[in-house]
């Protein structure tokens, strides 16, 4: 429990004692929200504004403040004073420091709140026969981070890669492969070789439109389960996944399931049947749609004129399947905001089918676009930045910086890998997800700015101090807290105490950036402390206390970085 929660609890108890007859008094969680931080520290660390209750209690705020104060249980680390309609709380900083540091280890903030609950996360969801470009970075890293955050809060989290592995383009690719392709070439060239085949198909089809029919026929064969077509198609998939796996390994990302669009081929009947039974399907130009005009949305396309299912149909089938299979409490879709309408439409369709849970359990976790050094990424203009190349460049650049800054570092390559990849992930997860991101090398790799390397460096600094302390025989020990009562320590401890709340809020808002920003602030507060105070001092007790605080900072930074998917090297 942090100081704020502790005070809220004291107020809750005092209110109940002071006004035993009153109805509807706020509970601790609500009181916590009322607590303010006074503009001037002389007025206390927290203030409880009593006017919030004057209507319910039909009393003036100063009277309420006085009554609460009289009923307040004496407590070893808080003191309170009435100031007008406020009850001001003063923390005993020393006692607070000891109590807080007593709770911090590498599992600080872990909780069992989510026990018994399941979250499905649909993220990354790349397309077969396409290369992983930096447009897929955000979905991959936001999803990966949310999975770790939910797990930390006790949920069962299921990571699903909803591969884009269905569509007529795969028929065209098989057609191209059969005509001009070579197994070994594709095996070696991977996705690039497949893309080349696809490009060739379109060039040739301009001269020979009959190819389009041939492509369609091949797709029909995949649909009908023709062994040759299915074999080639599955092989395309395997080749793509092998390429993607390289990127996932670099990023440290793993999935529980690779159940893509084609996985639902045999699960579409149920969707169509239910929609039909419930009278939700209407005809439009020969296609079957669900009318959503009541909801001010265009109709949701379910079946094409030729009877083929669509992206939305497959998403509906997948949601029903996941509900049946995993019985999720939440299903998150980490997908670019461009698909906002798509998700609103089919979420609504599922609700109209009578599945109430669609309303609050299906969530589109949308995010903005990534551009690269001021230029947007469009495949058409040939401005594609491939993720594996970007990651390799980041590692190279990090290595160059490390060679310069710490030429004597052991295993420089390994550290460069952690720093380079961390810099890219940090850049991706440092702002509210809905904001567009512009990626710049010198910004991402700056060791002094708000960057991954800066936070990692602070973590390594803590580790180095802890090593020195161990060598000098100083064991971490907060003692009586008297060495941790200065301004910088106060700021640092206040931040440390907030970590559990930050993790919860990041989960509630599906916003890993809250953790990224938090660890950056924490790193800043620690560095400030570090410059103002000698950690390893002549005074043994003071050193031990500062070392203990350093250890807590290391644990929290490391955990925070882990939760956003960034590694924390111990030496840099
Ligand atoms: N494959 C799609 C794309 O790259 C994203 C799929 C997202 N997930 C979903 N269930 N629709 O645009």
Image (cartoon, grey):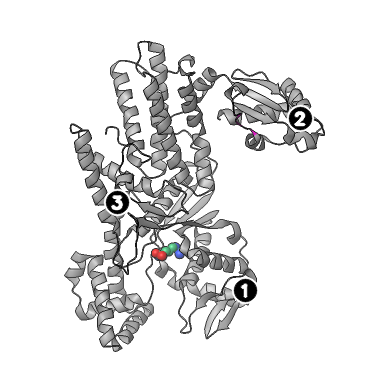
Secondary structure of the residue carrying numbered label 3: helix
Instruction: Check residue 293 in the rendering and tell me which mark sits there, or answer none.
Output: 1
Question: Which residues make up the magenta segment?
Answer: 35-39
Disc 3 from disc 1: Cα separation: 45 Å
Q: Tell me which residue sits at (24%, 41%) in the image.
A: 416
Front label number (2 vs 3): 2
What's the magenta bit mostly, secondary-structure-wise? loop
Between discs 2 and 3, the one toward the N terminus: 2
Asked if residue 254 can be seen in this view, the reply is no
**Foreground of the two, 400 or 321:** 400
Q: Tell me which residue sits at (46%, 24%) in the image.
A: 488
Query: Which residue ends up furthest to the top in the rendered image?
Result: 539
From the image, which quarter does the N terminus lie in? top right
From the viewer's perspective, is residue 359 above or below residue 83? below
Instruction: Check residue 249 in the rendering and tell me which mark sits there, or answer none.
Output: 3
Magenta stretch encompasses residue 115: no
Asked if residue 349 can be seen in this view, the reply is yes
Residue 395, x across and y down, in percent: 24, 46
From the viewer's perspective, is residue 336 above or below residue 82? below
Residue 334, x across and y down, in percent: 45, 57
Instruction: Check residue 61 in the rendering and tell me which mark sits there, or answer none.
Output: 2
**Foreground of the two, 82 or 102:** 82
Disc 2 from disc 1: Cα separation: 51 Å
Between discs 2 and 1, the one toward the N terminus: 2
**Crowd band around label 2 with a 10 angstrom C-alpha radius: few (<14), some (14–19), many (20+):** many
Q: Are marks 2 and 1 in contact (CB under 8 Å)?
A: no
Q: Are marks 2 and 3 in contact (CB under 8 Å)?
A: no
């Amino acid at each position: 429990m942090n100081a704020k929660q502790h005070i809220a609890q004291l107020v809750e108890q005092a209110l109940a004692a002071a006004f035993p007859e009153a109805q509807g008094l706020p509970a601790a969680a609500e009181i916590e929200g009322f607590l303010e931080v006074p503009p001037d520290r002389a007025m206390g660390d927290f203030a409880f504004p009593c006017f919030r209750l004057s209507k319910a209690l039909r009393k003036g705020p100063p009277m309420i403040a006085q009554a609460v104060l009289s009923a307040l249980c004496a407590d070893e680390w808080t003191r309170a004073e009435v100031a007008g309609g406020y009850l001001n709380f003063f923390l005993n900083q020393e006692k607070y420091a000891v109590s807080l540091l007593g709770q911090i280890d590498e599992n600080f903030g872990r909780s069992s709140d989510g026990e018994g609950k399941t979250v499905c996360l649909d993220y990354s969801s790349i397309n077969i026969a396409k290369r992983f470009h930096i447009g897929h970075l955000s979905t991959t890293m936001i999803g990966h981070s949310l999975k770790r955050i939910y797990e930390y809060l006790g949920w069962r989290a299921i990571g699903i890669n909803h591969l884009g592995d269905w569509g007529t383009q795969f028929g065209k690719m098989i057609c191209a492969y059969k005509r001009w392709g070579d197994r070994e070439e594709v095996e070696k060239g991977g996705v690039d070789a497949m893309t080349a085949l696809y490009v060739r198909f379109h060039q040739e089809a301009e001269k020979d439109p009959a190819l389009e029919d041939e492509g369609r026929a091949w797709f029909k064969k995949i649909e009908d389960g023709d062994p040759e077509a299915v074999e080639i198609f599955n092989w395309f998939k395997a080749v793509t996944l092998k390429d993607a796996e390289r990127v996932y390994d670099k990023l440290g990302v793993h999935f529980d399931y690779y159940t893509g669009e084609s996985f639902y081929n045999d699960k579409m009947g149920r969707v169509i049947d239910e929609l039909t039974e419930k009278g939700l399907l209407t005809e439009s130009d020969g296609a079957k749609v669900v009318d959503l005009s009541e909801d001010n949305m265009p109709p949701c396309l379910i079946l094409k004129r030729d009877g083929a299912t669509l992206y939305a149909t497959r998403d509906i089938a997948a949601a029903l399947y996941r509900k049946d299979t995993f019985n999720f409490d939440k299903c998150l879709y980490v997908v670019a905001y461009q698909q906002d309408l798509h998700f609103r439409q089919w979420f609504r369709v599922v609700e109209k089918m009578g599945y109430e849970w669609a309303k609050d359990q299906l969530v589109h976790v949308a995010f903005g676009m990534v551009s690269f050094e001021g230029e947007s990424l469009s495949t058409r203009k040939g401005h594609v930045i491939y993720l594996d190349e970007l990651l390799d460049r980041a590692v190279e650049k990090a290595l160059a910086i490390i060679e310069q800054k710490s030429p004597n570092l052991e295993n420089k390559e390994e550290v460069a890998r952690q720093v380079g990849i961390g810099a890219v992930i940090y850049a991706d997860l440092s702002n509210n997800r809905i904001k567009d991101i512009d990626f710049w090398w010198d910004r991402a790799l700056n060791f002094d700015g708000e960057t991954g390397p800066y936070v990692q460096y602070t973590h390594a600094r803590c580790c180095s101090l802890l090593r020195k302390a161990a060598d000098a025989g100083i064991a971490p020990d907060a003692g009586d807290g008297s060495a941790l009562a200065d301004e910088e320590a106060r700021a640092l401890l206040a931040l440390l105490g907030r970590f559990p709340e930050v993790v919860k809020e990041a989960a509630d808002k599906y916003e890993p950036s809250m953790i990224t920003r938090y660890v950056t602030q924490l790193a800043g507060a620690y560095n400030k402390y570090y410059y103002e105070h000698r950690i390893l001092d002549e005074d043994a007790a003071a050193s031990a206390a500062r070392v203990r605080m350093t250890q807590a900072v290391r644990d929290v930074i490391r955990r925070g970085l882990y939760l956003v998917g960034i590694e924390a090297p111990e030496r840099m």
